Structure formats: C-alpha cells, structure tokens
Image: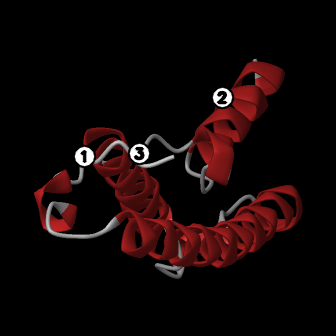
Amino acid sequence: MRRVLLFTVAGISLSACAKAPEAIQAAYVDDAQFSASSCRQLAEAYTAATERLLQTSNEQSAIRQKDTVGVALIGVPVGSLANDDLEPKVAALKGEQDAIKRSQVSHRCS
C-alpha cells in the first residue's frame, strides 16, 4: 500500500513539471501580419524568431531541470511553482515561425 501511494505521489509530482521545449506544440499565429513583408523581411523575421525561440527554449529546459531536481529532492516542481514556466512563450514563438513559413510559401520565396 505504501509503495502504491509513493508511486502515485511521484506520478502527480512529475506531471506538474515544466514540459521539454521540443514537446510543446506551436500556438496558432495568423500569418496576415506578414502579408506586406518582402521575402528578405520574412527571412530576417524568421531568423529573429528562431534566435528568440532558441533562447526561450534554453530557459524552459533550465526550468524543467529545476523541476526535476525539486521533485527528486523535496517532491515539488520548484521551477513551475515559481511561475517560471515559459510554455506559452515557446508555443507562441513556434507559432510565429510557422506563420512566417506560411507567408514565405504564399510569397513564393526561395
């Protein structure tokens, strides 16, 4: 009985951990905001979005690591409880990349 309770608590604690950046789905971003952009501007916007996504993903990974350590040591996902989870920001940046890609296709950029 004790073992079942321990596994249940561990499972609940781990499910509260921050998601890995690669497991976060893109949020929908309307590509209309890029409709007046040139191919060059779209390429620059994509590069900038990629750089911001890389930085934010690294921060999200660090939060996930804090959660993992917190759960292992005290049973609490420390990073997520501190409202540090960047999942919405990662999802928005992935969505921005998708919107830029759609705009590049509609502009027939190479």
Of the pair 100 and 20, the residue shown nearer to us: 100
Using a 10 Å C-alpha cutoff, classify the residue at mark 3 as few (fewer than 14 neighbours), some (14 to 19) or many (20 or more): some
Q: Amino acid at mark 2?
A: Thr
Q: Amino acid at mark 3?
A: Ala
Q: Nearer the viewer, mark 2 or mark 1?
A: 1
Of the pair 64 and 68, the residue shown nearer to us: 64
Residue position for label 2? 8
Residue position for label 3? 26
Work out whether mark 3 precedes mark 2 in sequence or the reverse, and give the earlier one: 2
Q: Residue at x 49, y 66 (%)?
A: 43
Asked if residue 103 is positioned above or below residue 25 in the image, the reply reads below
How far from the left and from the top, in percent, is residue 100?
36, 56
CB under 8 Å between callouts 3 and 1?
yes
In this image, 10 relative to 85: left or right?
Answer: right
How far apart marks 3 and 1 lie (CA) works out to: 6 Å
Asked if residue 106 is positioned above or below residue 76 in the image, the reply reads above
Work out whether mark 2 precedes mark 1 in sequence or the reverse, and give the earlier one: 2
Residue position for label 1? 28
Q: Residue at x 25, y 46 (%)?
A: 28
Under circle 2, the secondary element is: helix
Q: Amino acid at mark 1?
A: Tyr
Using a 10 Å C-alpha cutoff, classify the residue at mark 1 as few (fewer than 14 neighbours), some (14 to 19) or many (20 or more): some
How far from the left and from the top, in percent, is residue 71?
77, 58
In this image, 105 relative to 37: left or right?
Answer: right
Under circle 1, the secondary element is: loop
How far apart marks 2 and 1 lie (CA) works out to: 34 Å
Q: Nearer the viewer, mark 3 or mark 2?
A: 3
Q: Quadrant of residue 97?
A: bottom left
Using a 10 Å C-alpha cutoff, classify the residue at mark 2 as few (fewer than 14 neighbours), some (14 to 19) or many (20 or more): few
